[in-house]
């Protein structure tokens, strides 16, 4: 059976986006016409994922509400002659099953994924961070490519990477590149948020992973690391040291990652999606150009 399950961690507090995130999840912040997490779900559905397991936490119920089928709203739009708006709710009909599980303590990304163990059990699975969009309008095929590579190479893990400016390496998991093999490479190591001076490269983990379930064994043995959190990166690094076959795949040209975890990157994402909006993009850009002169 192919990989059809994705774990989507959405439990983080989003402290870098306060006060926006005080009473709403960062995954529900608008980017153009949709909230972040809707792009993530749509991207995964297009990549063949049929079960989405969200790892939630306090204050995240808006995410569950967003993916419910809201019959009352549908009825009232119909009754009030607002049928054209029904199109905006099409995503409710995606052919995916939603599973929600909780991370009961805020102990980091590695711990959040460990909280989904009883959902995943023994099967291989995708991890897609719920605060990052790949490519504009969720058209990215990267997860599909990652699953194909994972199956072809019988890999233990496949991770997406994006080259970032030197100043940004301290915000991400960074790769030490091993043997290069055409459009992918073997990972010799992975380090979480290194200092610029010590960074092994500028290749940053781009929020999408495919794993064998053996990952959980490494996560269980991972002590708290950077930021006093159980880091997914540290578990992957231990797996590589134990001989795990972990592969990296760079995002294709034009498949930029939008990280909705900090303001500079969130602003860029909103601008990009607003400017490429099929309906309002052109007039928005006219406005922007007028402001520039
Ligand atoms: C997490 C991971 C980091 C990865 C990043 C990708 O960091 O720990 O390795 O590069 O997501 O988006 P966070 O954004 O949770 O600090």
Image: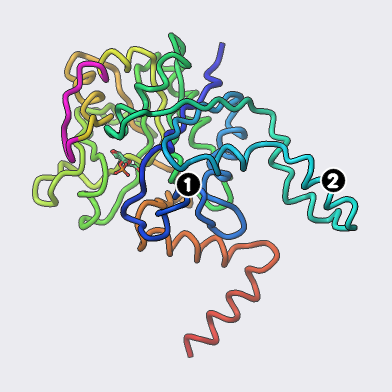
Range shown magenta: 219-228
Query: Within 8 Å: ligand 1 and the Cβ of disc 2?
Result: no
Quadrant for residue 262, please give it.
bottom left
Relative placement, left or right, of 25 versus 196 is: right
Note whether residue 140 is visible. no
Q: Position of residue 143 (x, y in %)?
A: 49, 32
The residue that mark 1 highlights is 27
Q: Position of residue 11 (x, y in %)?
A: 40, 37
Q: Nearer the viewer, residue 54 or 128?
A: 54
Label 2 Cα neighbours within 10 Å, binned few <14 / some 14-19 / many ≥20: few
Relative placement, left or right, of 138 versus 269 is: right
Relative placement, left or right, of 104 versus 171 is: right
Q: Secondary structure at mark 2?
A: helix
- Which residue is at 53% across, 82% downward? 289
Query: Within 8 Å: ligand 1 and the Cβ of disc 1?
Result: no
266 w.r.t. 65: above or below: below
Q: Position of residue 96 (x, y in %)?
A: 64, 28
């Amino acid at each position: 059976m192919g990989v059809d399950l994705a774990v989507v961690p959405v439990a983080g507090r989003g402290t870098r986006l306060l006060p926006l995130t005080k009473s709403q999840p960062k995954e529900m912040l608008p980017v153009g016409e949709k909230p972040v997490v809707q792009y993530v779900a749509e991207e995964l559905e297009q990549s063949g994922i049929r079960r989405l397991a969200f790892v939630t936490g306090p204050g995240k119920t808006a995410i569950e509400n967003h993916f419910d089928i809201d019959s009352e709203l549908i009825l009232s739009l119909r009754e009030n002659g607002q049928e054209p708006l029904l199109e905006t709710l099409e995503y409710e009909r995606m052919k995916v099953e939603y599973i929600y599980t909780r991370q009961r303590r805020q102990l980091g990304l590695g711990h959040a994924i460990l909280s989904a163990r009883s959902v995943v059990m023994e099967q291989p699975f995708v991890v897609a961070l719920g605060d990052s969009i790949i490519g504009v309008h969720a058209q990215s095929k990267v997860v599909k490519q990652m699953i194909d590579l994972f199956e072809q190479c019988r890999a233990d893990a496949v991770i997406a990477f994006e080259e970032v400016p030197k100043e940004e390496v301290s915000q991400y998991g960074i790769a030490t590149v091993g043997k290069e093999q055409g459009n992918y490479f073997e990972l010799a190591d992975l380090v979480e948020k290194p200092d610029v001076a010590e960074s092994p490269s500028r290749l940053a983990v781009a929020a999408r992973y495919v794993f064998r379930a053996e990952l959980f064994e490494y996560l269980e043995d991972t002590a708290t690391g950077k930021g006093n959190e159980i880091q997914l990166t540290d578990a992957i690094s231990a797996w590589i040291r134990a001989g795990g076959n972990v592969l990296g795949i760079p995002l294709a040209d034009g498949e930029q990652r939008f990280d909705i975890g900090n303001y500079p990157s969130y602003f860029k994402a909103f601008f990009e999606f607003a400017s490429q909006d099929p309906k309002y993009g052109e007039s928005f850009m006219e406005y922007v150009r007028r402001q520039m002169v």
